[in-house]
Image: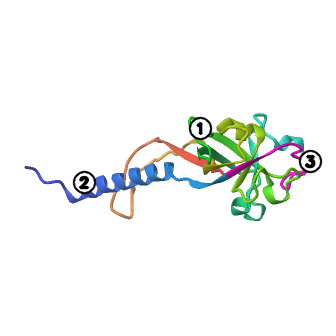
Amino acid sequence: MPQMQPMAVSQILLRLLIISTALTSLSYGDVGTAARYSPPYTPTACYGNDPSQFPSSNLFGAAGDGIWDNGAACGRQYLVRCISATVAGTCNPSQTIQVRIVDRAATSGSRPSREGATIVLSTTAFGSIANPSATSINVEFQHYCLLWKRSVTVPIEQPVRGSGGWNMGQWGGMWEAVSGSMY
């Protein structure tokens, strides 16, 4: 039986490590509670009376103290899904929504249906993932970071020798860079 070269084993292990890290980060989320609030939604702690702060989908919310982060939560987007509630059948488990934080729950003009919630959702957002008559639900939420791709051409005119002894000799290769923007 042929033996694997040490370099081949280390490359396989490195690839497995990268794949497992990527898969782990895809399933990362926090658990908390969500309440709902009704109009009037303005003024908000984040953007005052600016009507453009609200997404056309009306999927927005106010940050509870746990995620407010001294106002850094303003504009952040979260993926939110209902995972349980006091009354069975309250959640719509097939729905995950993307909400934008536009306010602070503790100072919002409209009071939340339950004090101390992690996130307080607009009536539209709350009704998308749960029975709108519920006052509070348990949610899984994840900060959503918008990424976009942009291609950059990097001409390589001569072979490059890396510090680890590797060689690169791809002439005129196309390399892709991923840039990210956090909301």
Q: Which residue is mark 2?
A: 8
Q: Residue at x 72, y 63 (%)?
A: 69
Residue extent of the magenta highlight = 34-48
Membership of 7 in magenta stretch:
no
Against 93, is 32 above or below?
Answer: below
Amino acid type assigned to the residue bearing label 3 in the image: Asn
Q: Which mark is residue 89?
A: 1
Q: Is 108 on the left or on the right of 158, as rendered?
A: right
Amino acid type assigned to the residue bearing label 2 in the image: Ala
Q: Looking at the image, tell me whether mark 1 or mark 3 is earlier in sequence order.
A: 3
Gap between marks 3 and 2, in whole Å? 60 Å
Tell me whether the residue at label 2 lies in contact with that at label 1, contact meaning CB atoms closer than 8 angstroms. no
Q: Nearer the viewer, residue 140 or 12?
A: 140
Against 32, is 147 above or below?
Answer: above
Gap between marks 1 and 3, in whole Å? 37 Å
Instruction: Give the label, 3 or 2, closer to the camera.
Output: 3
- SS under mark 1: loop
Task: Judge the density around disc 2: few (<14), some (14-19), many (≥20) Cα neighbours within 10 Å.
Answer: few
Membership of 40 in magenta stretch:
yes
**Res 183 seen here:** no
- SS under mark 3: loop
Q: Is 17 on the left or on the right of 99, as rendered?
A: left
Amino acid type assigned to the residue bearing label 1 in the image: Gly
Q: Which mark is residue 80?
A: none
Q: Nearer the viewer, residue 55 or 88?
A: 88
Q: Nearer the viewer, residue 141 or 26?
A: 141
Determine the image quadrant of residue 87: top right
Against 119, is 82 above or below?
Answer: above
x, y percentage for residue 164?
35, 63
Q: Which residue is mark 3?
A: 49
Q: Looking at the image, tell me whether mark 2 or mark 1 is earlier in sequence order.
A: 2
